[in-house]
Image (spheres, helix red, strand yellow):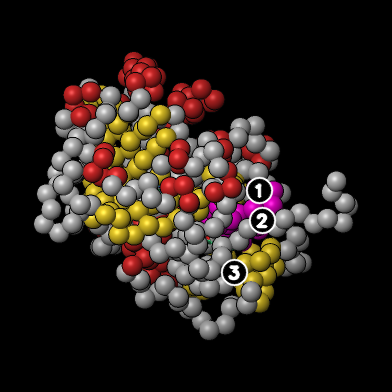
Amino acid sequence: MASSTETRKPFPQPAAGYTQSFWRTELDPLDNHRSTPDLPIEADILIIGSGYAGASTAYHLFPENQQGTPPKVVLLEARELCSGATGRNGGHLRPDLYSATKIYTERYGLDAAVEVVRFEIAHMKTLEKLVQKEKIDCDLTFTRSLDIYLDVDQLAAAKSFYDYLVDQGLDFMDDVQYLSQEDAQGKAKVRNAQGGFSFSAGHLWPYKLICRLIRIAVSRGLNLQTNTMVTEIGQDRTPEGLWPVTTNRGVIHARKIILATNAFTGALAPEYSKAIVPCKGLCTHIEPAPGAPYQELPETYAIRQGLGAFIYQISRKDGSIIVGGAQYTYKDIPDQWHNNPDDGTLINSVEHYFDGYMQRTFFGWEDSNATVKHIWTGVMGYSADSLPHIGDIPGKPGQFIAAGFNGHGMPVVFLCGKAIAQMAQHSVPFQKTGLPRLFETSAARLDPVYNDTVG
Ligand SMILES: Cc1cc2nc3c(=O)[nH]c(=O)nc-3n(C[C@H](O)[C@H](O)[C@H](O)COP(=O)(O)OP(=O)(O)OC[C@H]3O[C@@H](n4cnc5c(N)ncnc54)[C@H](O)[C@@H]3O)c2cc1C
């Protein structure tokens, strides 16, 4: 029986010594940057976390041709720049046009679900324009994504919801094409495929995008402090309205705080510990042997082996493949992934899954001698209701959150960062930011009715 003096296990924080991701093989000069040798003692706006959410927020807080004195913004990162989920993901920019939409439609109705789809689609054009405008060299590539089903019943259920969406006359469904078994095995080249869908998607080098956004913000006045762990946010503001924030390098006081801490949010805001859970995933970089024959795969893939059995994959211009997922191989061993913040080790039961994966999955890869060149893990912030938490933290005036992006941040986070910057800097209310209504964080969502994190 628990004694009254027993302390609860502390919520985990980012730890040193992570596995090496392919994306972090070319490090940016800012990777260990500190804009000032000492931690500033005060900030107008303090961002915690330098992944996609923190970087997008910082970028939007420092617009081009800013009038007047820029705000004093400090960004604290526990480890190196972009060393969390964003620097360790699959690089897949794939708006979800019909799959998660089913759950949202069942739970909240079609209109609310469609807002999420449109928001994700908007990221495609937004990122294209951003990369052009800021001349960001991050291998951004647009193509189509092939969503391939190996299980006949799962395909039939997906097709039935697809037909329902088409019947609603939704314009974005024009982009979603049904693939017959012949197409899925022939054009998509996937062995044992039963059929699937295809729609517009993209891929990129996430670390390079994030570093460039941060570099722009630093050049306009952002104070970046890497290797600075926030250990606590004080419960009360000072009489001047500042929140005391304790770090491993001293205390900084901030008028506004933005938690871009994803999986680790519960450590600084314990009220989120049931709503956002750290869940570990694994990803690999695979190369065909030099000179060996293989069929090019210009599209991206999601290959579904059955319910909850999902593999995501992109092809890089150099012929190599980034592929990850396969959670179904270890889902029944929760210790290995659920509530597991450790990206310093691999996941035992899936460690060798991707050996020979291309050869056994794709027609035309049998003699490729493709081998795994990099394998790594990363920690996602799974949310209990599968939706991110964005907006004002309940009961903590001046504190904001942009976290809980699950394994699906690339077509979601950038515009959330823009919105949270508007909320923190210009007091724009959530409803005026253009974010899907379902993303708004709330006290009700902190006591979740769903438990999607267990898959
Ligand atoms: C293996 C894997 C594969 C994935 N594949 C894809 C994919 O292909 N497509 C897709 O759309 N999404 C994918 N995702 C999900 C996607 O990467 C995330 O949704 C997204 O990157 C989240 O961005 P973020 O900024 O919220 O979190 P993060 O990138 O994790 O950033 C949070 C940062 O906060 C810092 N931090 C946390 N606590 C503190 C503290 N106390 N003090 C200071 N700093 C702190 C962390 O160190 C970290 O750098 C994948 C994720 C993983 C792990």
The numbered disc on residue 11 is 2
Q: In this view, does 361 lie above or below 34?
A: above
Q: In this view, does 135 lie above or below 40?
A: above
In this rendering, would 25 be left or right of 382? left
Which amino acid type is marked by label 3?
A: Met
Q: Which portion, as a residue range, is magenta?
A: 256-273
Outermost residue toward the right in this view: 4
Between the residue at mark 1 and the residue at mark 3, the CA separation in whole angstroms equals 18 Å
User: What is the x, y in percent for residue 316?
Assistant: 23, 53
Which amino acid type is marked by label 2?
A: Phe
Which residue is depicted at the point 18% across and 43% down? 366
Number of other residues with Cα within 10 Å of mark 1, as a class: few under 14, some 14 to 19, many 20 or more = many
SS type, badge 3: loop
Disc 2: residue Cβ within 8 A of ligand 1's nearest atom? no
SS type, badge 1: loop
User: What is the x, y in percent for residue 94?
Assistant: 34, 41
Q: Which of the pair 7/42 is nearer the observer?
A: 7
Q: Name the residue under label 1.
A: 273
Please report contact status of discs 2 and 1: CB closer than 8 Å, yes or no.
yes
Q: Quadrant of residue 358?
A: top left
Q: Which of the pair 160/131 is nearer the observer?
A: 160
Q: Is residue 259 magenta?
A: yes
The numbered disc on residue 433 is none
In this rendering, would 186 be left or right of 455? left
Disc 3: residue Cβ within 8 A of ligand 1's nearest atom? yes
Q: Is residue 69 visible?
A: no
Q: In which quarter of the image is residue 244?
A: bottom right
Number of other residues with Cα within 10 Å of mark 3, as a class: few under 14, some 14 to 19, many 20 or more = many
Q: Is residue 197 above or below residue 278?
A: above
Q: Name the residue under label 3.
A: 229
Between the residue at mark 2 and the residue at mark 3, the CA separation in whole angstroms equals 14 Å
Q: Is residue 247 visible?
A: yes
